[in-house]
Image (tube, rainbow, N blue to C red):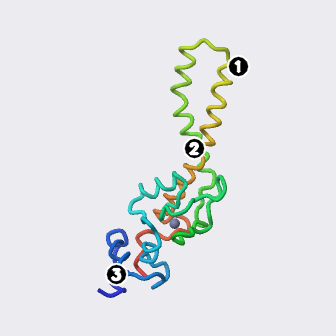
Amino acid sequence: MDMATLHDMPWRADIEFQHIICRVGCVPNCIGAIAMNSPSPSRSVWTAIGRGARGRCPSCSGTKLFHQFLKPIAECTHCGQDWTHQQADDFPAYVSIFLTGHLLAPPVVLLVKTVDLSVGALLALILPAAITMTLGLLQPAKGTIIAIQWWFGLHGFQSRKDFGSD
Ligand SMILES: [Zn+2]
């Protein structure tokens, strides 16, 4: 089987085969090269999401995805994936606020119904919890959104189905 035939294969089905045969830099955007450099290339959107949510490179998990709190790295030093194409914008904040509201609502309702506290005391309990949860969920939400954009080839990312067609 020659290299051209290998590169016509759907990348997910044959990545282990390419991992063995392909050499780094054989063609531009060679998925085999990515596979050889990465400890474990993502095989599903769920793997990519899990890695992004943990702040790891969704492609290979070899490096951190963020070099500042919400600032993703330009390029993975491990697999070479370019992350400058991500356009999460304000969506991580919406996701974080949505999740915080839904996770915090049941305990707040329970607290209000079962404990007789003043409004000031309730706010002193609820506000720090809400702020902490919102900030804590921001980076995982952004990592998840970047992983989804990358997996589905949104914005400037190369579509997964385009891999191997060079
Ligand atoms: Zn990587």
Q: Read off the residue under disc 1.
A: 120
Label 2's element? Answer: helix
Image quadrant occupied by the N terminus: bottom left
Image quadrant occupied by the C terminus: bottom left
What residue is shown at x 48% (from left), y 66% (from top)? Answer: 153
How far apart in space, not on screen, are marks 2 and 3 (Cα)?
Answer: 41 Å
* CB-based contact (under 8 Å), mark 1 and mark 2: no
The amino acid type of the residue labelled 2 equals Leu
The amino acid type of the residue labelled 3 equals Leu
Label 1's element? Answer: helix
Q: Position of residue 144 (x, y in %)?
A: 51, 53
Left or right: 57 as drawn, with respect to 40: right
Residue 61 circle label? none
Q: Position of residue 55 (x, y in %)?
A: 55, 54
Q: How many other residues sit within 10 Å of disc 2, few (<14), some (14-19) or many (≥20)?
A: some
**Residue closest to the eye, 26 or 91:** 26
The amino acid type of the residue labelled 1 equals Gly
Q: Is ligand 1 closer than 8 angstroms to the Cβ of mark 3?
A: no
**Residue closest to the eye, 97 or 132:** 132
Q: Read off the residue under disc 3.
A: 6
* CB-based contact (under 8 Å), mark 1 and mark 3: no
Mark 1 or mark 3, earlier in chain? 3
Residue 137 circle label? 2
What residue is shown at x 46% (from left), y 81% (from top)? Answer: 24
Q: Quadrant of residue 12?
A: bottom left
